[in-house]
């Protein structure tokens, strides 16, 4: 017995003429909110608010950013603005020391580069952190 496998499962069906159900809801919601703004606000204020709401509804229905619906961009923006942000690295300005031998131990310790360890993995990660290449003609086979 043969079964037909659906081919285009990501394409939404057109329900209301050339519009999908989702597009129809966005346009109807934008038009409805524009009408409410027209009825409740003074005319001079209702025109820009109504146009903004209708434009937002049209953008939700038809506008795509990188072939993704505009609602995904709006959702990502809201999530970004209201989510907690974790800042791991903050740059601090350090004054360079002219002569490390005459400087105090506390100052010279903060400026000195850490010693390379015996571990090649730590050496490699340190070189990647400071954007320095460890590969030279002679040491390439030693690291790998």
Image (cartoon, rainbow, N blue to C red):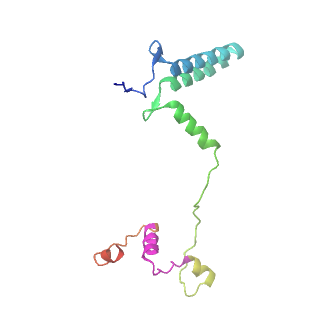
Q: Is residue 127 magenta?
A: yes
Q: Quadrant of residue 56?
A: top right
Instruction: Check the image and report above or below for 14 versus 134.
Output: above
Please state, as top left, top right, bottom left or bottom right, where the N terminus lies in the image.
top left
Residue 69 higher or lower than 144, as above or below:
above
Q: Does the image show residue 86?
A: yes
Is 30 a magenta residue? Answer: no
Q: Farthest front residue?
A: 1
Can you tell which quarter of the image residue 124 is in? bottom left
- Residues drawn in magenta: 111-128
Pinpoint residue 65: horizontal percent, then vertical percent. Answer: 46, 33
Q: Nearer the viewer, residue 47 or 56?
A: 56
Q: Is residue 104 visible?
A: no
Residue occupying the point 47% across, 74% down? 122
Q: Position of residue 78 (x, y in %)?
A: 60, 38
Furthest-bottom residue in view?
101
Q: Nearer the viewer, residue 133 or 142?
A: 142
Q: Is residue 80 depicted above or below 104 in this figure?
A: above
Residue 54's quadrant in the figure?
top right
- Quadrant position of the C terminus in the picture: bottom left
Given residues 25 and 102, the one toward you in this image is 25
Image location (x, y in percent) of residue 63: 47, 27
Residue shown at the point (37%, 70%) measured from the top left: 133
């Amino acid at each position: 017995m043969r079964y037909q496998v659906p081919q285009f499962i990501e394409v939404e069906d057109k329900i209301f003429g050339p519009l999908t159900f989702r597009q129809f809801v966005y346009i109807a919601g934008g038009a409805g909110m524009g009408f409410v703004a027209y009825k409740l606000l003074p005319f001079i204020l209702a025109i820009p608010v109504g146009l903004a709401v209708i434009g937002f509804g049209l953008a939700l229905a038809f506008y795509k950013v990188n072939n993704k619906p505009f609602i995904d961009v709006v959702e990502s923006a809201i999530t970004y603005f209201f989510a907690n942000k974790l800042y791991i690295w903050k740059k601090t300005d350090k004054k360079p020391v002219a002569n490390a031998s005459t400087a105090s131990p506390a100052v010279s310790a903060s400026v000195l580069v850490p010693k390379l360890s015996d571990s090649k993995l730590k050496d490699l990660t340190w070189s990647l952190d400071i954007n320095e290449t460890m590969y030279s003609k002679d040491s390439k086979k030693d690291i790998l």
